[in-house]
Image: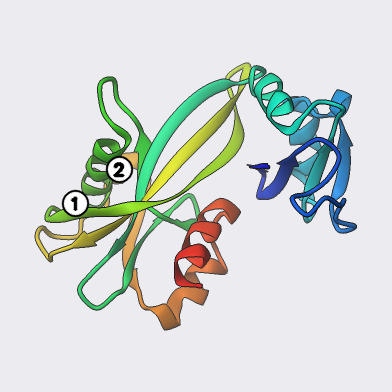
Amino acid sequence: MYKVFINDSPLFINSHADDKGQINSNLQVVDWPDATPEKLWQRTLNKAPEGMLMRTSLTGEEAWQRWQNQFLRLDAAGGLVLDDTQRFLGIFRLGRWDLPKGKTEEGESMEETALREVSEECGITGLSLDKHLQDTWHIYPYKDRFVLKRTQWFLMHWDGSGELLPQEEEGIEDLRWFSFEERGTFLSNTYASVGEVVRGFFQ
């Protein structure tokens, strides 16, 4: 099953059911004709539902392939960065806490993108990549189209090199280390997809 975030509301893409073979009663069912980017965006714009389940006669993979053809596809990568005390690094941008990430450049691997973007957005060096954590998907409007963006998230470790310096030209206002006990402050004001990465790592 695929999960795509739309205005912080997840859309689950499957045939007729969730991954347990049943329709979750808490999810709003969206039939295929109503699963266009424009309709989904408007549906979630003012009050995002707890979640939505796409209902179609297609198999999950067929539905996913056909549905994503409606979008401009972008790939990005970022990192959950830990220091030597196991605190993680958050960036504050557009009024919310986030994790450093950015779009891949031509010829880069996703690992290279993640390391470059974290270094650029946070001003630090001495980063080492540990492992891939997960991918997240979300959509957003761009000019006269909608973008479907996949972000690959990696666990990273920082050796203390470089000075924390927010990349202001990217709209980053602040940087902060969060301890395990302080993660609630981050999670209370972040994006649903980013919160999923942090919760998934610390659970």
Identify the residue at horizontal 34%, vertical 67% (top origin).
Answer: 88
Q: Earlier in the sequence, mark 1 or mark 2?
A: 2
Which image quadrant is residue 87 in? bottom left
Q: Amino acid at mark 2?
A: Ala
66 left or right of 90 in image: right
52 left or right of 170 in image: right
Disc ID at residue 114: 2
Is residue 100 shown to the viewer in this render?
no
183 left or right of 10 in image: left
Between label 1 and label 2, give the one nearer the viewer: 2
Which quadrant, please, contains the N terminus? top right
Density class for disc 1 (Cα within 10 Å; few <14, some 14-19, many ≥20) is some
Disc ID at residue 161: none
The secondary structure type at the circle numbered 1 is: loop
Identify the residue at horizontal 63%, vertical 16% (top origin).
Answer: 144
Which image quadrant is residue 63 in? top right
Identify the residue at horizontal 17%, vertical 54% (top origin).
Answer: 127
Q: Amino acid at mark 1?
A: Gly
Is residue 177 shown to the viewer in this render?
yes
Density class for disc 2 (Cα within 10 Å; few <14, some 14-19, many ≥20) is many
Identify the residue at horizontal 77%, vertical 34% (top origin).
Answer: 40
**Vertical placement of 102 versus 81: above or below?**
above
Q: Which residue is mark 1?
A: 123
Q: Position of residue 14 (x, y in %)?
A: 76, 38
Q: Position of residue 108 (x, y in %)?
A: 26, 27
166 left or right of 133 in image: left
C-alpha separation, residue under disc 1 versus residue under disc 2: 14 Å
**Vertical placement of 185 versus 167: above or below?**
below
Please name whichever residue, 145 or 61, is drawn nearer the observer in this view of the structure: 61
